[in-house]
Image (cartoon, rainbow, N blue to C red):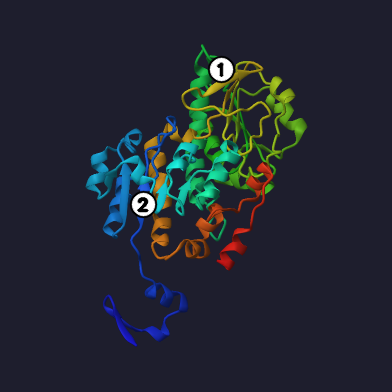
Amino acid sequence: MSQTKGNYSFDEKLLPQAEMLEEKKSKRSLCIGIPKETNKHENRIILTPQAVEQLCEDGHQIAIESGAGIKSKWKDIDYTKAGAIIKSRSEIYKSEIILKVSPFNEEEIKLLSGNQLLISALHFNTQTLQKINKLKQKKITASAIELMKDANGYNSFIQTMNEISGIMAVNTANELISNSDIGKGILLGGITGIPAAKVIIIGAGTAGEYAARTAIGFGAQVKIFDSSIHKLQNLKTKLGIQLFTSVLQKKVIIKALKTADVVIGALEDTTDENNIIISEKMISSIKKGSVIIDLNIDSASCFASSKITNLGNPYFKKHDIIHYCVPNIASKSPKTASIALSNSMFPILKKISYEKSTPNIIRNIVEIRNGTFIYEGILTNERLAKKFNIDYKDIDLLSAIF
């Protein structure tokens, strides 16, 4: 059958199969709810007014809670002009799809009507068995943005948040170490006649790269450690400068720590809870007044002395070392971070609109499938199952059955 597409005619029989499927797939209207973040230290919002406008133009319904974008410098009127409707908190939690940045807490889970799709961060170290069980009881499908890898293993959420986190880690370290009431009262970058501060970065992935770029920009001396020679070589090539790099050899790390002013934990693979690389003894050897920035605190820290903090009370001292362990450090730059989150979320929502049911969403959208840790009330994440000693089912097997 001959059809017209734009200024060109084509024969449907000659189309590749994937394109034929795309032509025949029809869109549906999504009912999306965006509540105000209850975590007072979370400043980001997951969709910008620009993304909302495009979604509304495509026929989707966006309900947003009053004040949800205020910390990211967007007012309610910015969203209503884009086509969103301001609704009450209880109404928003009845939406088919609910989008948040921070993980759902127990009070928010109580408001859910059930059989919904939730998309938010997971923050493995903040999860409790009670929350998991309540999500299961309501037959929720929950997908974590930090797990949403595409078919090539790429996660745009993590990529952009790691870029921001790496920059913010060095900026924060400079704030702390230059403050004589908190740190040493020194600058990261040296000036004439005064040597630069020494920065150690554990991890040569995206966060490590952007931390290194920023620290070098300050004029600091930078040393980078990672278990992957490939990542270290790749980073040296990207930065285009002579850079001290080393694999994670204990003796080399110990020697470097003794002269360090700042140590940044920025490992990429944080799926292993037994991830401690810097022991308490090693930390106690660091110069007093130095700073540790833990970018892995929400998943699996590499520092034995770390514990979760927040933007309201971001650091503590142990062994006379300043520990900054905020899991959402990117939230210190909320507008930039929100735009980055929105840029990643928008195309996924477009994909969801072409699927008629939750099983189809899981089967056909690889990012959602990889991010899902609860599927229609069934736990599908092995790491959570081990943490709480409960059963789980493989998501690929489940999506094939349903």
Dot 1: within a 10 Å radius of its alpha carbon, few (fewer than 14), some, or many (20 or more) residues? few
Question: Is the C-beta separation of discs 2 and 1 under 8 Å?
Answer: no
> Looking at the picture, how far across and down is residue 180, in whole percent?
51, 12
In this view, 106 is above or below 321? below
Disc nearest the viewer among 2 and 1 = 2
Q: Nearer the viewer, residue 272 or 187?
A: 272
Q: In the picture, which quadrant includes the C terminus? A: bottom right
C-alpha separation, residue under disc 2 versus residue under disc 1: 56 Å
In terms of secondary structure, where does tag 2 sit? strand
In this view, 184 is above or below 246? above
Q: In the picture, which quadrant includes the N terminus? A: bottom left
Dot 2: within a 10 Å radius of its alpha carbon, few (fewer than 14), some, or many (20 or more) residues? many
The residue beneath circle 2 is 32
* Residue 339 visible in the shown view: yes
Q: Of the numbered discs in the image, which one, if any, rests on residue 194?
A: 1
Q: Nearer the viewer, residue 367 or 10?
A: 367
Q: In this view, does 88 lie to the left or right of 211?
A: left
> Looking at the picture, how far across and down is residue 154, in whole percent?
54, 54
Q: Of the numbered discs in the image, which one, if any, rests on residue 322?
A: none
